[in-house]
């Protein structure tokens, strides 16, 4: 019994060194050598300031910006406390918050078609960096009006930021909201 | 539902089967002590581990000795992980300090990771220091999976050996499974994940200057976003491959730094089922009849594929709350449509549904979408997959040994029908095997039902429920189904970070691990001692479609008889209410 216990303790310590220290270090060394920018969070630096991670959604709320997915974190898009709303499908609170989002979108200049569902539902992480192309197109009128830009210029910018599904098969077509907004700010 | 979605799901299965076979054969060589291509590189490492851990004799163990090593290793791991969490604030490490974890939360998390469950009653990025994630959680991700594999190896030897007492050596099975299987595959997967944007760094924070500061009532606007970074990729790779599922971040693989692209998603999702599927081939090779392993795999697929289709169909429809006037819920080339609450745009409905089914079929428990916001029928399928006992793929090792328990019950039933002594893989199945199999199959069922009943009957249990009505009951049922079958996923609205749930679910996870693994080892010991009987005219062939059908039926019947009443109170009622 005692001998087995000693082996258990020593085995755990050895495994801790192997799988808890050596393994993450190997991945760290190789990962940072091969993909230095991605291993550190894919941050976007503009004029020497970190303006975001291209993978992590930000809470755009002003009329002048393309909005991302609604976020259930507090405050919105809190990258230090990720999570979804966890509202069940029959929870009246879900219906109420969706109604409020619809009203907000329809209060601003908008096209006559219906709102894509991803624009009124909270993402799983609260940090979804993307919206669907349909959701980005839905916002073109509002953004163009707020910035005094020609509709066509904004529309073209959206189309330039549409990413197709990977290999035409995996995942969904999408638009990275931070990249789109950075490009929007660069339009003069 | 879109053709592209179905095609992606189909491609997933093709890739899974193509990868599982060679990996399974490789594992069989590893367990048999044969040379593999990795020996030249990793052989010295294996021998160094034996030297450093003082493991001089590596003789075969009988089942009691094997079980003792298994239990001791779990207990030592639990104590170590508990201590690490309680002391994480006082550790003299320079980066990413965090306060000590409270006692009941640390109790729950220690058991959770040691038992390969990875139920998380805490929010990863908020409370766990990178040191705890690496030295504690990350280590158990590997060794809890390797322990499950070891038990399966022992059971396979029990079938393959005749008139023997030894089942192999727990320590060599543990070490070889880690060194030759889990570690190399994790390194490869982790690096591919880094290439997609999963972070791997020891800088633990980065501050972002927001383009559009967030207005806050009665205080200055928030103009910064704090990114939590860390050694994430290494953690994510093993949590997917080892059917652990414990995320670095609270949002798990819905978090874009844990699962940033459709490519990372499909690889992580493949990793969920890869080893559980591969081990079917391993088992076939170990018992020297590959058809037997294939039959078990086919049974799993027969049960699994309809579940994937059901979740995909259910989630493609939007619940009435989203199907409001002015909202477009139809899927198209430029929009995912469907029930997008709690889902990410880059994954959409198909990949979220496939993941949800995979992670609950295997006892992985990671999520790339929030199950609490699934439609009632989508949530129902994930519940059922766990309640079937985590045998449809199931945990690494534990899933297949669970399915073999059902195979023992299936041949017993067939034997009753024709009045013959049942046999499986050349071994007569006696009273002892049936007693142990029944215990191991029924114990998790009892844990789930009793635990749920106690929780909904006590104020302490009910206080944690987040959603009103039937869905609130589903949250509790999901929690005990998950813990009581070592899955680890959650209807995460439930506030599980209370003393009641931390303790109750902790005990459930311990029960689910040992009350299955120990009877399995007892069966292995009993079978190893028996002679092999040659198949006769009255032997039920266990590799054909008839047996696949019988086995699948037994799994479904046991699950249905046990859980339909409970399911009727939760997701079924909710579905009916939603239709009104």
Image (cartoon, rainbow, N blue to C red):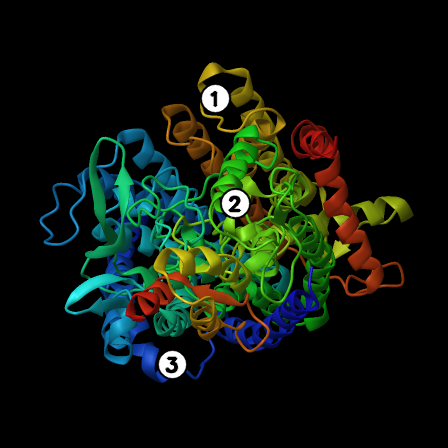
Q: Does residue B541 appear in the picture of this structure?
A: yes
- Residue denoted by label 3: B39
- Pointer 1: what residue? B461
Label 1: element kind: helix
Q: Secondary structure at mark 2?
A: helix
Secondary structure of the residue carrying tag 3 is helix
Q: Are marks 2 and 1 in contact (CB under 8 Å)?
A: no
Which of the pair B533/A89 is nearer the observer? A89
Chain assignment, label 3:
B
Q: Quick check: marks 1 and 3 in contact, CB under 8 Å? A: no
Q: Nearer the viewer, residue B58 or B409?
A: B409
Q: Chain of mark 1?
A: B
Characterize the local packing of mark 2: few (<14), some (14-19) or many (20 or more) Cα atoms within 10 angstroms: some
* Callout in the foreground (1, 3): 1
Q: Is residue A43 above or below residue B255?
A: below
User: Which image quarter: residue B36?
Assistant: bottom left
Q: Quadrant of the N terminus of chain B?
A: bottom right
The residue that mark 2 highlights is: A106
Q: Are marks 3 and 2 in contact (CB under 8 Å)?
A: no
Gap between marks 1 and 3 measured at Cα? 51 Å
Dot label at residue B89? none
Left or right, residue B552 beside residue B170: right
Identify whether A33 is placed above or below A54: below
Do discs 3 and 2 belong to a common subunit?
no
Please tell me in which quadrant of the rendered image residue B510 appears: top left
CA gap between label 3 and label 2 equals 65 Å
x, y percentage for residue B100?
20, 37
Question: In the rendered image, which quarter is residue B54 located in?
Answer: bottom left
């Amino acid at each position: 019994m005692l001998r087995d216990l000693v082996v258990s303790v020593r085995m755990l310590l050895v495994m801790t060194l192997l799988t808890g220290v050596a393994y993450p270090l190997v991945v760290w060394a190789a990962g940072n050598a091969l993909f230095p920018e991605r291993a550190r969070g894919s941050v976007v630096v503009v004029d020497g300031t970190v303006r975001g991670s291209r993978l992590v959604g930000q809470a755009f709320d002003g009329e002048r910006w393309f909005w991302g997915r609604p976020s259930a974190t507090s405050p919105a898009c809190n990258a230090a406390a990720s999570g979804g709303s966890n509202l069940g499908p029959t929870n009246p609170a879900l219906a109420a918050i969706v109604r409020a989002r619809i009203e907000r979108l329809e209060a601003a200049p908008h096209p006559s078609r219906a709102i894509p569902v991803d624009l009124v539902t909270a993402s799983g992480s609260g940090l979804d960096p993307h919206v669907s192309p349909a959701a980005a197109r839905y916002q073109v009128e509002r953004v163009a009006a707020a910035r005094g830009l020609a509709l066509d210029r904004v529309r073209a910018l959206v189309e330039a930021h549409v990413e197709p599904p990977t290999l035409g098969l995996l995942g969904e077509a999408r638009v990275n909201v931070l990249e789109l907004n950075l490009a929007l700010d660069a339009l003069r | 539902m879109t053709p592209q979605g179905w095609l992606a799901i189909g491609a997933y299965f093709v890739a899974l089967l193509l990868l599982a076979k060679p990996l399974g054969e490789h594992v069989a060589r590893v367990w048999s002590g044969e040379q593999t291509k990795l020996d030249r590189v990793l052989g010295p490492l294996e021998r160094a581990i034996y030297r450093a851990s003082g493991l001089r004799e590596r003789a075969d163990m009988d089942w009691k000795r094997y079980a003792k090593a298994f239990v001791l290793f779990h207990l030592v791991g639990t104590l170590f992980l508990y201590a690490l969490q309680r002391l994480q604030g006082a550790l003299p490490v320079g980066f990413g300090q965090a306060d000590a974890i409270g006692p009941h939360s640390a109790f729950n998390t220690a058991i959770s990771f040691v038992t390969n469950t990875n139920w998380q009653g805490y929010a990863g990025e908020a409370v766990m220091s990178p040191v705890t994630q690496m030295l504690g959680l990350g280590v158990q991700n590997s060794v809890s999976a390797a322990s499950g594999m070891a038990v399966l190896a022992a059971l396979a030897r029990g079938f393959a050996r005749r008139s023997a007492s030894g089942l192999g050596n727990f320590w060599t099975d543990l070490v070889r499974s880690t060194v030759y299987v889990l570690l190399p595959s994790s390194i490869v997967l982790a690096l591919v994940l880094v290439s997609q944007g999963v972070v791997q760094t020891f800088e633990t924070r980065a501050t972002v200057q927001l383009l559009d500061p967030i207005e806050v009532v009665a205080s200055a606007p928030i103009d910064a976003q704090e990114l939590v970074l860390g050694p994430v990729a290494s953690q994510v790779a093993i949590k997917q491959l080892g059917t652990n599922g414990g995320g670095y971040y609270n949002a798990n693989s819905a978090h874009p730094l844990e699962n940033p692209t459709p490519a990372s998603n499909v690889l992580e999702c493949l990793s969920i089922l890869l080893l559980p599927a591969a081990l079917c081939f391993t088992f076939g090779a170990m018992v020297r009849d590959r058809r037997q392993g294939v039959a078990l795999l086919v049974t799993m697929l027969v049960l699994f594929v309809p579940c994937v289709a059901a979740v995909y169909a259910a989630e493609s429809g939007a619940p009435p709350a989203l199907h409001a006037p002015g909202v477009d819920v139809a899927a198209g080339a430029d929009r995912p449509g469907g029930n997008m609450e709690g889902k990410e745009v880059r994954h959409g409905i198909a990949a979220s549904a496939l993941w949800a089914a995979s992670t609950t079929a295997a006892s992985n428990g990671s999520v790339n979408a929030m199950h609490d916001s699934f439609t009632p029928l989508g949530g129902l399928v994930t519940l059922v997959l766990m309640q079937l006992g985590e045998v449809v793929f199931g945990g690494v090792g534990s899933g297949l040994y669970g399915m073999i328990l059902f195979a023992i019950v299936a041949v017993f039933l067939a034997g009753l029908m024709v009045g013959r002594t049942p046999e499986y893989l050349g071994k007569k199945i006696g009273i002892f095997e049936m007693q142990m199999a029944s215990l191991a199959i029924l114990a998790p069922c009892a844990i789930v039902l009793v635990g749920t009943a106690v929780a909904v009957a006590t104020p302490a249990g009910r206080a944690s429920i987040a959603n009103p009505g039937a869905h609130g009951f589903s949250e509790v049922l999901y929690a005990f189904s998950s813990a009581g079958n070592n899955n680890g996923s959650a209807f995460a609205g439930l506030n599980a970070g209370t003393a009641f749930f931390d303790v109750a679910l902790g005990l459930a996870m311990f029960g689910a691990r040992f009350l299955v693994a120990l009877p399995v080892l007892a069966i292995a010991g009993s079978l190893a001692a028996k002679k092999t009987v040659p198949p006769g005219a009255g032997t039920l062939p266990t590799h054909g479609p008839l047996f696949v059908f019988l086995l699948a039926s037994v799994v479904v019947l046991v699950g249905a008889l046990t859980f339909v009443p409970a399911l009727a109170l939760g997701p079924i009622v909710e579905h009916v209410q939603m239709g009104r």
